[in-house]
Amino acid sequence: MYNKLKNNLLVFYPSGKMDMNFSTEFEKVLQKAIKDNPKCHVLIDLKNVGYLSSSGLRIFVNARGILNERGFDLKVSNVNEACRKIFSITNFDDLIDVYETEEEAINSFK
């Protein structure tokens, strides 16, 4: 769950299943990073995430709310087919911008 800071952008690389167990820990890390870096956008690269549960979706909603209040965005990249279907079925792709690659997502913040 490595994260890095590029200019005013926090990039996260979760891996595995974003289920209830993983989501709890990832949410703590994400919320702390957002709190410690209040003037940053967030990109979550999902290329190593094979499964996304409602707990994972909740993390995105909560983080997006905090960021939007501050005038910043949350975007995701490298979403595999299974996770993309979940985004589509739940209309999450209407709520959060989804990009094919990390580079496309990073460029969209400019």
Image (cartoon, helix red, strand yellow):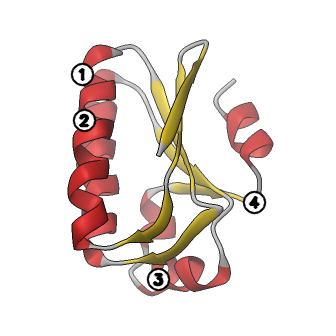
Label 1 sits on a secondary structure element that is helix
Residue sitting at x 39%, y 13%: 39
Label located before the other in sequence (1 or 3):
1
Which of pointers 1 and 4 indicates the residue nearer the eye? 1
**Callout count:** 4
Q: Which residue is mark 2?
A: 31
Tag 4: residue type?
Glu
Residue 106: x and y, percent?
Answer: 70, 34
Which three-letter amino acid code belongs to the residue tagged 3? Ile
Query: Label 2 sits on what residue type?
Result: Gln
Q: Are marks 1 and 4 in contact (CB under 8 Å)?
A: no
Q: Measure the alpha-carbon separation of dots 1 and 3.
A: 28 Å
- Identify the secondary structure beneath mark 3: helix
| Identity of the residue drawn at 22% across and 71% down | 20
Q: Give the Cα separation between the discs numbered 3 and 2.
A: 23 Å
Image-based side of 29 in relation to 93, left or right: left
The residue that mark 1 highlights is 35
The disc at residue 86 is 3
State the residue position of label 4: 100
Out of 27 and 42, give the one closest to the viewer: 27
